Image (cartoon, rainbow, N blue to C red):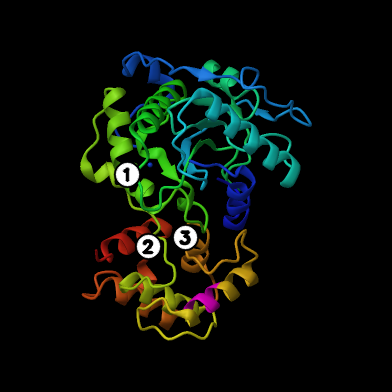
Amino acid sequence: MGVPNASRRSVLLGLVLTGTVGGLIRPAEASAAAPPVKSPPIIGCGAWRARPPSTPVPVWDRRPVRIIVHHTATANVTDLSRGAAEFVARKIQEFHMDRRRWIDTGQNFTISRGGYVLEGRHRSLEVLRTGSRHVEGAHCTGQNVEAVGIENEGTYSSNAPPDQLWDRLRDMCAYICHQYGIPPTEIGGHRDFKDTLCPGDRFYGMLPQLRTEVADLLGEPLSDRAARRASWPLLRTDSSGPEVQAAQHLLRAAGLTVQPHGRFDERTTAAVRDYQRIHRTEEINGLIGGETWPLLVTARGTDRQEVALAVRALTPAGAVRASAIPGEEEWKRMLNAGRRS
């Protein structure tokens, strides 16, 4: 979701629950290129007794270009009924409107652990069916006009989502991609854009599978490489490896005091927090994710020698020179190539 991790924990406490594009569909030819894709059953705001928004929701006269997958970071409940799904939707809306002071639920759609799909923000279902406009959400700062946000009930750091949820998410993503001409490669996770654990390590690791299954439903098979597109690695306490060493050199290039030994220790966490404060990122949490990485790799006026050392940490053979790096995508490729499982 597009709220800080601390706020996610507040949602959990409040609920108190127990128990990129080549060869793919382009918008202008989506209907002709893809087989018919039906909408899964979707419970509208009126059906789950949503409160009206405090002000009219913004509707943009253009298509979104991606889908962002979230998890609610709430309990992995065993009640899979429609009643439980509607209860979760109401509690999320209550939190977003009363605590966050948003005009309505932040995400466009919610999928329960029982596989029920619910409209989140008002008018999201109506507008999706037109295939040409988009309801602005509040699920990921900087992406709310660009992306459809889907919230998935539960916490998926170590557990996989249940089959019912997964199947509905796949069907919902296929329908959204079909309606808007979004390539399946543009299905991402919250952490791709923010410094957050969302949608959980296990769920995030399943996104290549999701892209593949959605592409199959659309009749546009993906290669394994396309399904596993390059992304910003999420670094946190106890992470280690060449990508950590590269991040430490980039922090040093920005004037922070940290040793480039490749271990994400307490000093590194403190340096990242300092960097986030300086740049006023949405989260001051010491994680390096989809918001802090782009700042680090595109900073100007930094120590170029440290930047060169960051490159060398990721490309020991010196295949890429710091002065030759064109931008974020090259950094992503180097960071992905440098990962060690």
**Of labels 2 and 3, the one closer to you:** 3
> Quadrant of the image for the N terminus?
top right
Residue at point 48%, 35% (across, down):
65
Local SS, label 3: loop
The residue under label 3 is which amino acid type? Answer: Gly
Local SS, label 2: helix
Residue at point 62%, 22% (across, down):
48
- Compared to residue 228, the image places residue 123 above or below, namely above
* Marked residue nearer the N-terminal end (2 or 3): 3
* Marked residue nearer the N-terminal end (2 or 1): 1
Residue 334 in the image: state x and y as whole percent: 31, 63
Q: Nearer the viewer, residue 236 or 256?
A: 236
Mark 2 Cα within 10 Å, few/some/many (few <14, many 20+)? many
Residue 223 in the image: state x and y as whole percent: 21, 39
- Compared to residue 123, the image places residue 275 above or below, namely below
In the image, which disc is placed on residue 206?
1
Local SS, label 1: loop
Residue furthest out toward the right: 54
Figure quadrant of residue 173: top left
Figure quadrant of residue 55: top right
**Of labels 2 and 1, the one closer to you:** 1
On the image, numbered disc 3 is attached to which residue? 289
The residue under label 2 is which amino acid type? Answer: Trp
One can see residue 12 in this view: yes
In the image, which disc is placed on residue 152?
none
> Quadrant of the image for the C terminus?
bottom left
Q: CA distance from mark 2 to mark 3?
A: 13 Å
Look at the image and give the residue range highlighted in magenta: 268-272
In the image, which disc is placed on residue 331?
2
